[in-house]
Image (spheres, rainbow, N blue to C red):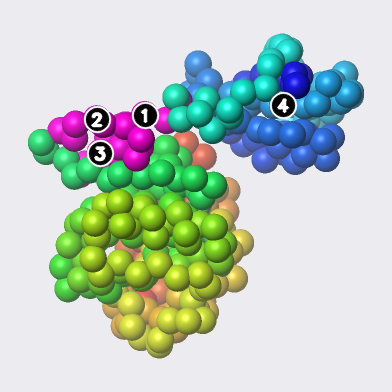
Amino acid sequence: MSWNQLTIDVPDDLIDAVVGVVSADGVAGVWETHAPRIGLTRLVLYFTPRSNLDKVETTVRSIFQRADRPAPSISRAVVEECDWTEEWKKSYTSFPIADSFFVIPSWENSICPNDRLPIRIDPGQAFGTGTHETTQMTMDCLERWVERSQIVLDVGTGSGILAIASRLLGAKRVLACDIDAIAVQVARANIVRNAEADVYAFCGSLDAVSNDSVDLLLANLTADLIMGLFPEFERVLRMHGIAILSGILREQDEDIRETVALHHFNVFEEITQGEWLALIVEKHGG
Ligand SMILES: C[S@@+](CC[C@H](N)C(=O)[O-])C[C@H]1O[C@@H](n2cnc3c(N)ncnc32)[C@H](O)[C@@H]1O
């Protein structure tokens, strides 16, 4: 079988809108990869031969127009069916992340530099390759805030990358949860792959965690999810416990800060990368 392929370089803040409309137009697959310019992501979109590509192009162009951006150049190609997983694997190779780590895809035999700790990952269907800014910012913060005596809770663990990093940095015990059962399977396999003891992944969320039991909470989610879950963050964190909040768009800064203050947390630090923001907050309890 052959597929119609459209390739478009999209400003990072328009990705969700473009993916939204192409999903409504029956896209069969979306591959996000690096574009030649910072601030852009290359979207490679696959459609069946029967799809109306002219209509898709018009809808995509209208998003750019409404956002007052120059019209994108869209290239078309016809590609033959192949093993997409194998193709994707070629683009995911080992790389350093934060100051301490070196991510190695599980199918690669790369040698980890002496001054870094290896994390072997097969992300499967889960989020958490380590290439996303929001994961990278959380890793940066984690390096500075994790302590040996701590119980860490990784909310929305995805591939388990942050949970594994927490333990490698010396956290005493790590709980990792995700509401997606497939992500939990992936995280468990990665935890075993990295031979990490005292990292427990479970399917579910904060309601399975006791009151005042967590020293450091990691939440690389979305602003809406973080705001909705904040009463639970407050409940499970010990007094003076720390939460690293990521997955927040810069424009959502004020909303998040309002929620943080409402629940008696202080903001210690704010870091940004591209359009993304991460906050380090402390529970002070009123
Ligand atoms: C952006 S991914 C983060 C993956 C990984 N922690 C990272 O930083 O790369 C967010 C994950 O949160 C999970 N999730 C969404 N809502 C959740 C909730 N209420 N409780 C637990 N996990 C949740 C999703 O299934 C997804 O795997």
Distance between the Cα atoms at labels 4 and 3? 32 Å
- The residue carrying mark 1 is 93
Badge nearest the viewer, 1 or 3? 1
CB under 8 Å between discs 2 and 3: yes
Q: Nearer the viewer, mark 4 or mark 3?
A: 4
Report which residue position mark 3 lands on. 102
Residue at which label 4 appears: 46
Label 2, label 3: how far apart the Cα atoms are: 10 Å
Magenta residues, as a range? 91-113
Secondary structure state at the residue bearing disc 1: loop
Residue 250 on the magenta span: no
User: What is the quadrant of the C terminus in the image?
Assistant: bottom left
State the image coordinates of residue 53 (x, y, percent, origin top left). Answer: 84, 21
Count of numbered badges drawn on the protein: 4
Residue type pointed to by label 4: Tyr
Taking the spot 30% from the left edge, 37% from the top edge, the residue there is 104
In the picture shown, does residue 279 fall above or below 107? below
